[in-house]
Image (spheres, rainbow, N blue to C red):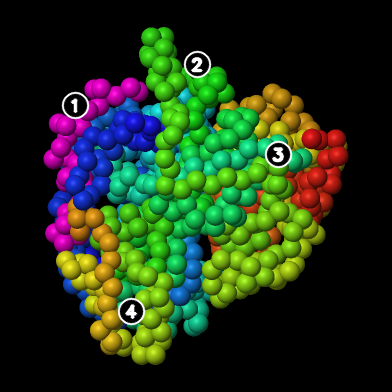
Amino acid sequence: MSKTLFDKVWDAHVVRKIEDGPDVLFIDRHLIHEVTSPVAFLGLKSRGTRVLYPNRTFATADHNTPTIHQDQPVADPLSANQLHMLEENSKEYGISHWGLGHQKNGIVHVVGPEYGITQPGATIVCGDSHTSTHGAFGAIAFGIGTSEVEMVLATQCIMQPKPKKMRININGKLGKAVTPKDVALFIISQLTTSGATGYFVEYAGDVFENMTMEGRMTVCNLSIEMGARGGMIAPDETTINYVKGREFSPKGEAWDKALAYYKTLKTDEGAVFDKELTFDGSTIEPMITYGTNPGMGMGISHNIPDAEQVEGGVATYEKSLGYMGFHEGDAMIGKPVDFVFVGSCTNGRIEDFRAFTSLVKGKHKADNVTAWLVPGSHIVEAQIKEEGLLDILNEAGFELRQPGCSACLAMNDDKVPAGKYAVSTSNRNFEGRQGPGARTMLASPLVAAAAAVTGVVTDPRTLIEELV
Amino acid sequence: MDHGLWTNKNMAYDKFNILTSTAVPLPIENVDTDQIIPARFLKATERVGFGDNLFRDWRYNADNTPKSDFVLNDPTYSGKILVGGKNFGSGSSREHAAWSVYDYGFRCVVSSFFADIFRGNCLNVGVLPVQISPEFLEKIFAAIYADPKTELEVNLEAQTITLLSTGEKESFDINGYKKNNLLNGFDDIDYLQSIKGEIEEFAKQLPL
């Protein structure tokens, strides 16, 4: 029988099906961080349970960590306590721990793939909704709650009803300055913030096939923002070339065996999806959001739609625009920008910094803009330096901070002040996400760069005539 | 708000059967988990006190004074049932959102649509998510606004929700396994630990 990629991976991990209940799903790789794990460990302690497979769980600190002076003690006592708890719990239960200051420390969804923890055909979970990132490798990867973190620690399984399947096909040549982030924001704007709830998405078509792994991770990362539990892309040569030789990737005979498995990981001809959507890649523009959920996005040259043109209640729409200080019919081009944030598990990889740097090269940061450039990991940080990007950035008036989640969710000191506008390469423009009262416009690293050098929302296509 | 119950084996939360209560209306769509509990309140290492920060930034001004126009600060409305707009609980997987709802005193959230992870988290911590039709949701909002003393009856065994003032009712879905857990106060780890041998055998044949 024809099977989808999703079916193949899911079915290979079902320990037991419960009648009128969820499947018991075996989890190959479990990533944990300081914020959603402490209560799970408390639960283990109170049950007197050990961690069943400590070598399948990996800990890194990212949500709470400062992005400057990482060599010094963390000033906030609550953050410091969470970081300490992660270290203590990891030590007690025999889990690898890449804490602050460790060379492998970084954003969980950046370091997982970098070290080969992420593998095609694996099941991967983490107490973080952007775990969907790892689907870029043809893995089933999704975010879980803390009760489920405890389940995985104790039994390496979670209990989940099998989601429905959706395929999103996009073919065609992407336009100038249209990046994977724009493709994702475009899809979400078409489906709305809840349009894929209940589904697991497979992305197919030459637009995704032509993307690097970094680009695919950006797309899969944002799957959750349309409600999908996760998104995945069938592994190909690009995937295998990325995975091969990484520290935790299979080696020798195990690699040959893994490779044979990876090659089976594609949707069979004739396999049926519960829902299938197709878009034309050539129609996608550089995108920006204007509201308070990621579905409220549009081509950057457009005007903010009227309430009647969008799905959902008028009161909710008006509340959202009111929070942003925007009005129906406003152009986004020219809107004021106070902060620019480049980073996060969505756009904190080397390709994102290359894109940002390519646009700001030879220009200068606008005086009214505070820019936070935060690499996703020490590997990304080192690459930025090795490739000479840092020198270009410094010359243009930008500085690089140290790895972490940073202003994406503003748990550390990187908070956008109330009422201020940020163009952010992160994943959520929810009210207060980047600090209480902060107003977020989500966009690609190129749109962020255009805002950073002009001080207002600017179409990057007007600044990069030479780029195609 | 019995914090002591949380980590007791076989009894992670109060059992749920029939809940009859007035309800608090929040007719906003796409209520995300960053609104339910903002990230800056996720720094605790124990599951206590989250109810104080439920809807923190909608509920309090920057100087911590209550915002009088937010429904949780309006003494007209109270109860153990929160009625929210479509797509309730979107965004972050933080279980703290479900803990906050529970810790504040809600045992049930009613909406016409729930985000997946939030729904699952609720079920795991003893909050019953009840999904109903958009039409019935509108009726419930209208009934609460017409009379804030209006009561809803949520019957888990029968899988029904009834607007007691008019007798109108709808049934709701929940799988039999989760229903049994909630009725008895069981949790998934108890179940998974009971099949540990099967899990260990399964692990031996995995490709990765």
Quadrant in the picture for residue B24? bottom left
Which residue is tagged 4?
Answer: B23
Q: Earlier in the sequence, mark 4 or mark 1?
A: 4
Circle 3 sits in a helix, a strand or a loop, which is it?
Answer: loop
The Cα atoms of the two marked residues, 3 and 1, are separated by 48 Å
Compared to A254, does A293 lie above or below?
below
Query: Mark 3: which amino acid?
Result: Leu
Return the chain for callout 1.
Answer: B
Which percent across, then down, holds residue B116? Answer: 39, 54
* Image position of B206 with respect to A202: above or below: above
Q: Chain of mark 4?
A: B
* Segment colored magenta: B180-208
Image coords of residue A420 (percent x, y): 68, 62
Could you say where residue A307 lies in the image, as x and y percent from the top left?
A: 63, 71
Measured Cα–Cα span from mark 2 to mark 3: 31 Å
Dot 4: what SS? strand
How far is mark 1 from mark 2, CA to CA?
29 Å
